[in-house]
Amino acid sequence: MNVYEKSKSAGPTLKRDPGERLLGSTRSGAVFVITVFLVTVVQTLMVPLVDLATAQLPWPLVVPAVVGIPLLLAGCAVQAMVFLLLDRRPEIPVVVTTAVYLALVVGLEVPSWLSGMKLVIALSLFFLATRRRAYVSLLWLVGVSLVTVATVTLWVLSVAEDVQFSIAFALGEAMTFIAPAAGAVALGIWWGAQKRRTEIARERAESAEREHEHRVEQARDRERTRIAQELHDVAGQHIAGLITLTDAALQLAASRPDDARELMADVRSEGRFAAASLAGALSDLRAVGAELPEVTADLRRLDELISYWRKRGVEIDLVTAGDFADLPAVVSTSVYRCVQEALTNAAKHAPGAPVTVTVRHSFDRLSLVVENGRADDGRVPVAGLGLGWGLAGVTERIELLRGSLRTGPTPEGGWRLDLNVPVPPITD
């Protein structure tokens, strides 16, 4: 299951990093608290301070100004500072800001001065809605609204003699409280949904990037494996060729020294050709995005491979049937590598033995048989040259093509490789 599916199955909320902070760093949190405090103080104390300065109206609070103003400042400060607890539990600011507002309304009996505190309560509900599910946020909105409206209504009825006026005043206060609170919750729910979508998109992008990096690394590993196999095939073929020529030269050295010298010249040429071939294979390690210097080796070049070994004294009988030009590239290349490996092994382990190569392409199948006889001319098989990659590499190639490969000794003392690969039929 990918990141997006996990997020969908988890519901509308996304599991957050425990280190995530709503107000950001400590410095940004302090700036936020100070801003809320100053804005609330200005809205709360502007009217009473102007009235005191101009002495237009008597002081309306039940307590003197030297007590009432510090109480209002303390209430504004508590409402602002409680936002520092948002990251612990966003419900705490909602409870504290509401309690401070109601305590000052009932205690000082000046609800008209405290309109700024209603906005602070709405702000706390906004942050709550960004962190909680929508139905939880709505329940908090309903609960806070009911408690606030009920408290203000009971207080107004207790201090006012005119019931009709009290109800009208309570309804007005309720509307001025519920409207910003409901708007804040709605914005918080929207903001939280947008943030969750952004987080899901970011995690999907990060997951896609990781998947891309993984695929790139897999491609690099496959390319390294391909180059290693290429080096093995090239090195094995040419080293076996060098040994075959050297073996023949040693046999002729005593009786036919001139022919032996010619063979040694061939050994030198073969060594140079082997070095050039290895350099070409190694160039793949340095060339990024460059085209390969040679055409891909496949069954269309089978005659060149057979000619290579015949020039080095290997007796090869080649039998072919069918057309190899339109074979799928991966099939043609893989079978060619199998022939290359089989001939290399025959030259190393059965020097001087005759080899028969039979390749047939029928309607929906490609078969290969490479069989070599016993080395009857006294030559000693060359041991210690194999890296263990030859047959393993051939087997991996054929398994990927859903083919079959059988290898083993023959009754005559030779070795046989029998391969069959399914080939999709070619349709016009």
Image: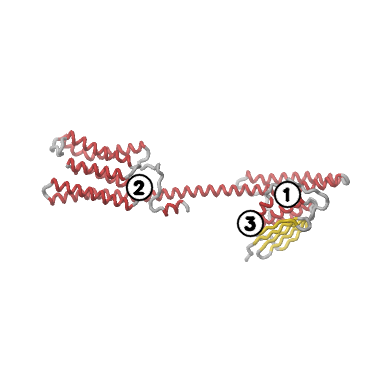
Mark 1–mark 3 Cα distance, whole angstroms, equals: 23 Å
User: Residue 262: horizontal and vertical position, in percent?
Assistant: 83, 46
Is 229 left or right of 27, judged from the image as shown? Answer: right
Residue in the picture at 58% in, 49% down: 219
Q: What residue type is labelled 1?
A: Gln
Q: Do labels 1 and 2 touch, CB within 8 Å?
A: no
Query: Dot 1: few (<14), some (14–19), or many (≥20) neighbours within 10 Å?
Result: many
Which amino acid type is marked by label 3?
Glu
The residue tagged 3 is 399
Task: Indicate the position of residue 6 as horizontal and vertical percent values.
Answer: 44, 52
Q: Does label 1 or label 3 sit earlier along the sequence?
A: 1
Quarter holding the C terminus is bottom right
Dot 1 falls on a residue whose secondary structure is helix
Please report the residue visible at 75 percent of the width from the left and 48 percent of the height from the top.
240
Q: Which mark is residue 237?
A: 1
Q: What element carries label 2?
A: helix
Q: How crowded is mark 3: few (under 14 residues within 10 Å), some or many (20 or more)?
A: few
